[in-house]
Amino acid sequence: MKSAFKKLPGSKKYSLDAGLLFAVTLCAILGTLLIYSIVRSGISEGEGVTASYWKTQLISMSIGAVIAVIISFIDYRKLAKLWFIYAPAALALVALTFTSLAYRRGGADDQAWIKIGSFNMQPSEVLKIAFILSFSFHLSRDEENMNKPLHMLLLLMHAAVPLGIVAIQGDYGTAIIFAAIMAFMLISSHISWKYLIAAPFLAAAAIAGMWFFALSDFHKKRILVLLHPGTDPEGIEYQQDLGLTALREGGVFGKGLFADPSEYVYVPEQHNDFIFAFVGQAFGFIGSLGVIILLAYICLKVFSDSRVAKDRLGRFICMGAFGMIFTHCVMNIGMVLKVAPVIGVPLPFFSAGGTAMVSMYAMIGLVLSTYSHRAMSYNVFYEADD
């Protein structure tokens, strides 16, 4: 066996996807500035949005960036093999949301947070990373046999565990994210065309089952109102209508980050799930388009990194990250544009939330690890086999 420190991070064989890390950090900085502007204007004081929000965002961004770089040095294969440690730990954290430690965040209709003293977090964000790593490891080990019915059933059961537990929480938005992650990873594998043909029918059956046996009348109305706009403008449509108004008020170039507070349209949760509405107010159509392009670049960069990954495990990790970020963006912006139901999905790197920020950066760190190790023989914490 050769020394684990034969080649250090500064060697010629180590490379960092600086473009991806820069784009992610630019989004995080813009998000922090937007939240600072919301706090400074006082338009969301009624929701308890204080200076602690932008400070938390700034600290989380800094911690997340450091974590991402550190993870990029570590061989992702070593991390994946530790699934038996972090997967049960992540599930245990989510299980705490069913105990007295559970915390319902203001403006949310699900109990998906835990609070210990003054510290609160959303465990499902940690579970996303654990799932992508463990499912990637499972898929890479079983890809040759995955089309056998029993093996496919085990893969689906693997995905059903995190998806089911967050659905029981009532966090249907996160459940959809888990389903999307699984779908993107399976599609990128050697899955048989027979399963791909059957997938839409199985999805339709699952949606029907959720509609008739799981969704509350309130959640059903959130979906139905999209098909019949104007039927409940003072209730369920209220937030989305205000979001559209905010986007229109921003015009082409926006009102700026620090305009007179009276010029801003108040939108509930605009520091969090509806921050894209404030993007439209502050930066206008041009700025909103720029944010979409920046997020699209991140998605495409992650997808591109999946194509140059050293092995199947690296490819699956990247595709899981792509599925997570892409689905978050589409669902969040769709909510504001009133083409998707309001189901509490934050905009990556923009919406307020320390847990989400750090976990997103950690996920980017895993992508950076697959990129930096694509042509390396040795690296820190990695020892090549003879």
Image (cartoon, rainbow, N blue to C red):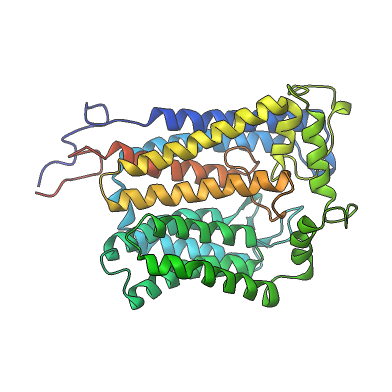
Q: Please say if 236 is above or below 30.
A: below
Q: Is residue 372 left or right of residue 339?
A: left
Q: Please say if 272 is above or below 256.
A: below
Q: Please say if 69 is above or below 164.
A: above
Q: Percent x, y for residue 110? A: 70, 62
Q: Residue at x 45, y 38 (%)?
A: 300
Q: Percent x, y for residue 46? A: 85, 42
Q: Residue at x 58, y 42 (%)?
A: 348
Residue closer to the observer: 13 or 142: 142
**Can residue 373 be seen by looking at this rendering?**
yes
Q: Residue at x 17, y 39 (%)?
A: 377
Q: Is residue 276 left or right of residue 324?
A: right
Find residue 75 and report its image quarter: top left
Q: Is residue 75 left or right of residue 278?
A: left
Q: Percent x, y for residue 188? A: 37, 54
Find residue 383 and report its image quarter: top left
**Tally of marks:** 0
Residue closer to the observer: 98 or 369: 369
**Can residue 113 be seen by looking at this rendering?**
no
Q: Residue at x 30, y 58 (%)?
A: 81
Residue closer to the observer: 336 or 2: 336
Q: Percent x, y for residue 57? A: 61, 36
